[in-house]
Image: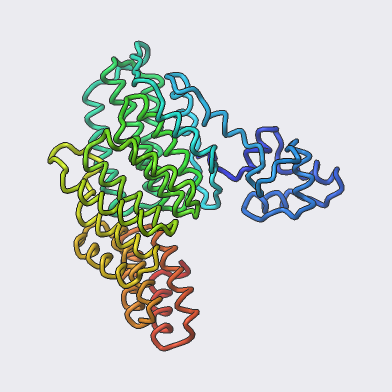
Amino acid sequence: MTELARHPLVAARQQRGWSQEALAMLMRGRGLGTTRKTVTRWERGVTPDAAAQQVLRALFEVPHDMRTAWPNWLPTGTDSWVCEKWDRDGTVRTLDIVAEGAVMDRREFLILTGAELLLPVYEWRVNPEPWIAARQRGRHVGQALLDELQALIAVRRRMDDEHGGAALLEALHADYRFVIDLIKNGSYGKDVGRCLYGLAAEIARIAGWVAEDSGRHASTQSYYLAALRATAAVGDRALGVNVIGLMGGQARKAGRPADATKLLDLAAAESARTPETVQAMTWARVGRVYAKAGDKGTTHTALDRARKLLGRAVAGDSPPWAYWVSETRMTEQLGGALFDLGDYEGAERELLAAVAGLGEQYPRDRAVCLARVATAQLRRGQVDEGCSTARRVVDLLADHVDTERGEHLLRTFRQELAAHGPSATSRDFTEYTTARLGSK
């Protein structure tokens, strides 16, 4: 697959038609010793020194008063698709651009932050009534195919629950491209068109989540923004709220609490027009982002509201993608919030309860919960208990699920364990981890 969500320097130089060698030559013409390998290193995450950045600013004609940090000041041209009009033509172009390029490289950079990230979300919020244009040219798209695609999406959701990982992301991207091709080139009436945009939205939403769980944050944004476009096309407010909530969760994990809280505040406001299950899910996410921001009062208020809303949920009223929202998930969210607030005893209690409630299902979520429990135990001085819990995480990662999020939490635990100093327990755990996971 081609790269859409790539390092900003790749996008900036390709927008100018410059190869790596061409950019290096231009740099050398300004008195630096830049080579193609130097440019490659920059595009893999190495930050240029001050002199190189000064020349790059001149070459890319970046205003001197733009004070944002590298690489955010590079002109990437992402506005060409993020800022498309919210009508049929703009939406189809956006969906198609994302279909043509989803990065599979782990070395990524977030495309949008701050106002640039919030703008398309506000556009979604004020978007006019849903529209669907029938298309009369191309091969016929019938109900049988739609039924098969709906069944496939249900399978993909469960595959994510059980496995996750890069292979599933590739499969989802192929599914997404197939549906976008039907939208662009198929022949269908308004009801089938509505279903096609809905399918595109849900596939992009799942792909975004899998990309995020795999540590591919830039492509995550691309998928989420494509999903948001498609939800607007059919007026699916509930799925749009879900997508914005996921975007806020991504910002929380990336250490951008201001973006996270603004996104979740907006999602919570818009959730009032959705089923109680969706509202409960959204308010639980509100609690998580405010916990990360250190706001204990808002955290507990939001999580209490989430539980009350879930208790009022009407059976059969929830969208199919919300099948996982339950009391156990509320407990999981409370445990995660307490962990972020530094209440490690409370976090351990709630997260272990959530793991018990999940049973044998959802190995990734059990791994994430247990990794936080292990770290909470370690931070309370319970080294033996922490290592015992972390072994369960190792087994889940080795035998069941591919999740960068779980691996990151395990790496954090190992780093903090090393800081406690050498011991027989830590040595045994390190040997066990290496034997089961290798160098992960």
In the rendered structure, the answer to whether residue 171 lies left or right of residue 73 reads left
Observer-nearest of 70 and 333: 333
Relative horizontal placement of residue 440, taking residue 288 as reference (left or right) = right
Pick the residue in front: 286 or 132: 286
Residue situated furthest top in the rendering = 136
- The answer to which of 240 and 389 lies nearer the viewer is 240
Q: Is residue 340 visible?
A: yes
Task: Count up the numbered dots.
Answer: 0
Residue 170 appears in the figure: no
Give the vertical position of 21 relative to 341 (above or below): above
| Residue at point 62%, 37% (across, down) | 76
Reply above or below: 401 against 124. Answer: below
Name, please, the residue furthest toward the left. Answer: 315
Residue 415 in the image, given as x and y percentages of width and height = 48, 73
Residue 187: which quarter of the image?
top left
What is the x, y in percent for residue 396? 31, 65
Q: Which colouring convention does the figure follow?
A: rainbow
Q: Residue at x 16, y 43 (%)?
A: 313
Coordinates of residue 384 in the picture (x, y in percent): 34, 83
Residue 57's image quarter? top right
Residue drawn at (49%, 55%) of the image: 255
- Residue 36 placed where, x, y %? 73, 48
- Residue that sits furthest to the front in the current view: 297
